[in-house]
Amino acid sequence: MNILIIEDEKHIALRLQRLVTEISDDYLVIGKASSVEESVQWILNNPSPDVALMDIRLSDGISFDIFKLVKVSFPIIFTTAYDEYAIRAFKVNSLDYLLKPIQKEELRLGLDRVKNIISPQNIEQLIELVNSKSKIYRKRFLLPAFDGFITIDASKIAFVYFEYKSTKLVLNTGVEEVVPYSLDELEDELDPEYFFRANRQFIVNIHSIERILNSFNGKLKIILKKHSEKEIFISKEKSTKFKEWLNQ
């Protein structure tokens, strides 16, 4: 069985190669890569292996990015140092994994279990999982003031809106601060557990929502706890996603 090792730590890659050789003479490591870019190039320029041992964290990104860039037509065993929550998710998705530090017997069993080619559906779910567990969201903003700077905790933001070519943070106190970011950038930087992109103009904090009203054409209207003249609507198309977010 021909094996590809994708691992950014050289000593771990060498140890995996040694273990593979010890397990069976029929197992042969035919290639190694240490990054997403190297992996893509290897896959494009070589015959497919029978299986790949793939680390999740690589030097230039996460290994799931590989599947976005090139077609992978061979089964995978992921190697991971993730916590129990992540490992349970891997099991649910019917993926084989090895927990670092990798033991010889676990590797033997893992190689025996690998039978199915990984599916795009599993990859998308795992990309979402890894991003949600690994990404650090913005906690505060440093903004210029007339005599220096001020800091604003993200938790104190009631909502964000874009108007007249400016993006503004509206705090729970009603104070507004202009920030040099687009709504798209803030949507990516603010924790999606608490902030929701209502439409092209608004991002709202779940703690600032008082009520949700039915509106015209299947839309929803958000009523904030603090008085605001801004009207925030959720489109009919986005209302299901919004309700799921509220009901987590």
Image (cartoon, rainbow, N blue to C red):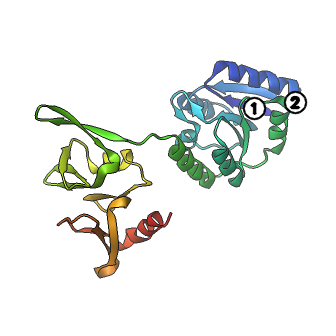
Q: Is residue 186 left or right of residue 48?
A: left
Q: CA distance from mark 2 to mark 1?
A: 10 Å
Residue sitting nearer the eye, 24 or 191 = 191
Q: Position of residue 41 (x, y in %)?
A: 57, 30
The residue indicated by pointer 1 is 3
Q: Is residue 197 visible?
A: no
Question: What's the residue at 36%, 74% (across, down)?
Answer: 236
Residue sitting nearer the eye, 52 or 87 = 87
The residue indicated by pointer 2 is 26
| Image quadrant where residue 113 sits | top right
Q: Position of residue 130 (x, y in %)?
A: 56, 44
Report crowding for label 2: few under 14, some 14 to 19, many 20 or more residues within 10 A (C-alpha): few
Q: Considering the image in quadrants, where does the N terminus appear? A: top right
Report crowding for label 1: few under 14, some 14 to 19, many 20 or more residues within 10 A (C-alpha): many
Question: What's the residue at 32%, 77% (across, down)?
Answer: 213
Q: Are marks 2 and 1 in contact (CB under 8 Å)?
A: no
Q: Position of residue 15 (x, y in %)?
A: 75, 21
Q: Position of residue 67 (x, y in %)?
A: 57, 43
Question: What's the residue at 21%, 49% (across, down)?
Answer: 167
Q: Which mark is residue 195?
A: none
What kind of residue is marked 2?
A: Asp
What kind of residue is marked 1?
A: Ile
Which residue is most to the front? 173
Q: Is residue 221 visible?
A: yes
Q: Earlier in the sequence, mark 2 or mark 1?
A: 1
Answer above or below: position of 150 versus 171: above
